[in-house]
Image (cartoon, helix red, strand yellow):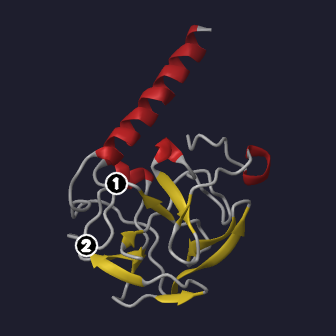
Amino acid sequence: MKRQIWKLSAATALGAFFLAGCSSGGTAPPASSTVAGSQPSVALKTGQTALGTIVVNGQGMTAYVFDKDTANAGTSACTGPCIALWPAITSPTASPQVNGVTGKVATIALPNGTRQVTVNGLPLYTYTPDTKPGEDAGQGYGGIWWVVGPDGNKVAATPAPATSGSSGQGY
């Protein structure tokens, strides 16, 4: 029983640590951060989940926006430990290729030389616990992370746990 309580406490602390890291201000991940999600061809396309048609990266992984980001600010508010849980969707070019996305797609420059893809001026991210295309376990995480519709607007609905494969809590 003590071991289970310890595990639950550790998991809760880890989740709080990542969520706290996501709430810090800043401009972008430091040059030593690993920015995952780079696609050589199509950077964004659409996919189907329990939430309907949403934006996904070139590998089909769900794209998310962060409420603490400001549209058209040219920076990401997700830095430090946050970027480890929410890797930036990147593009090798300033004009990423898209398929089915109708929102305005562009990029912002990160300090490490990569370009983070944006839609309607908001930086896009994937969620590390989503391990297969179509998963959307990050939806609603902390009340500040949301999947994105093809028009670039966040989707605020929460999927039913049985159909999305997520707990609805995001961790």
Rendered residue at 37%/35% (across/down): 17
- Residue 171 position (above or below residue 136): above
Quadrant where the image shows the N terminus: top right
Of residues 106 and 28, the one nearer the viewer is: 106
Q: Are marks 1 and 2 in contact (CB under 8 Å)?
A: no
In percent of width and height, residue 113 lies at 24, 76
Is 22 situated left or right of 60 in this image? left
Q: Residues within 10 Å of mark 1 (few under 14, many from 20)?
A: some
Whether residue 71 is visible to the viewer of this picture, yes or no, is: yes
In percent of width and height, residue 110 lies at 25, 71
Of residues 66 and 58, the one nearer the viewer is: 66
Q: Secondary structure at mark 1?
A: loop
Indicate the amino acid at tag 2. Gly
Residue carrying label 2: 74
- Residue 54 lies in quadrant: bottom right
- Residue 24 position (above or below residue 154): above
- Residue 93 lies in quadrant: bottom left
Q: Secondary structure at mark 2?
A: loop
User: Real-space Cα distance between discs 1 and 2?
Assistant: 13 Å
- Residue 1 position (above or below residue 39): above
Indicate the amino acid at tag 1. Lys
Hey, which residue is sitting farthest right in the picture?
Answer: 162
In percent of width and height, residue 167 lies at 66, 41
Rendered residue at 43%/88% (across/down): 96
Is 69 situated left or right of 150 in this image? left
Is 139 situated left or right of 112 in this image? right
Looking at the image, tell me whether mark 1 or mark 2 is earlier in sequence order: 1
Residue carrying label 1: 68
